[in-house]
Image: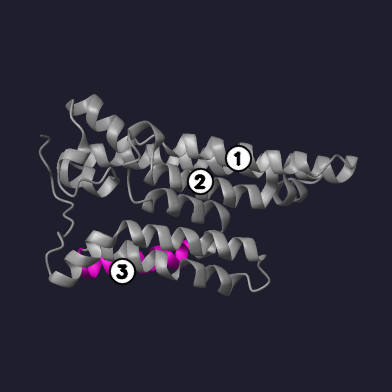
Amino acid sequence: MTIHEVLYKGLLGYWVEKTGTHVAVWFIGFAVCAVAAYLLGSLNFAVIISKRKCHDDIRNYGSHNAGMTNMLRTYGKGAAVFTLLGDASKAAVSILLGTIINGQIGAYLAGFFCILGHMFPLYYKFKGGKGVVTSAVMILMLDWRVFLVCFLIFAGIVASTKYMSLGSIIGMLIYPLVLYNFNRATPDFRIIIATAISALVVFMHRENIKRLMDGKESKVSFGRKKSK
């Protein structure tokens, strides 16, 4: 068994193919990937850090979103960095688990359910973040070329407008298109999952879109922020 076979098929997929085991076992692997990734995604580090550090809930402040940008605006760069690292780690672990168990399909599926858990966390009354960091980590781990293009566009928009939300929306809107452009022979499941993630992230930014249209959206500041 080569590394390429493991990455593409996963240990379970390779075993099913070689031993002739009933294909239902393969689908059980998908279910395990999905459930484990959702539970990992539900660990919302913005909520965890705000409660541990400041004994309060980040969802009570600012945009009421449990994500890195609201942590930056409310509690400053230190809290935002730890939130970023936590959310990135849970996405990375989910995708690695999906890859090992069910290969490329498992990785995309695990990434999707981790993002879903981040947005609608089981442990925090299904009120979480918008999934930008977890989506970015998934894109980076599965195709660095796609990540680079999306990130450069995101960074350019944020640098020129100071609207983090606008950069995130545009970056995620082009994600399925960039993925397809780099992988014209891409299996349909990748494009379908990428499109679903893109639609979810944009949907979670619906209030930001309204504020952008009304000229009321807050601009991001990377200056020093005093903790509440």
Q: Which of marks 1 and 3 is nearer the N terminus?
A: 1
- Residue 89 lies, in percent from the top left, at 45, 38
Q: Does the magenta portion include 130?
A: no
157 and 46: which is toward the camera? 46
Which of labels 1 and 3 is toward the front?
A: 1
**Colouring of the image:** one colour
- Secondary element under disc 3, as helix, strand or loop, is helix
For residue 82, say whether it is visible.
no
Left or right relative to 22: residue 39: left
- Residue 59 lies, in percent from the top left, at 21, 40
Q: Which residue corresponds to the image point at 21% horizontal and 33% vertical from the top-left?
A: 57
- Type of the residue with mark 1: Cys
Residue where numbered disc 2 is placed: 113
Task: Give how far apart the Cα atoms at labels 1 and 3 are.
Answer: 35 Å
213 and 166: which is toward the camera? 213
Q: Earlier in the sequence, mark 3 or mark 2?
A: 2
- Secondary element under disc 1, as helix, strand or loop, is helix
| Magenta residue span | 147-162
- Type of the residue with mark 3: Gly
Badge 3 vs badge 2, beta-carbon distance below 8 Å: no
- Type of the residue with mark 2: Phe
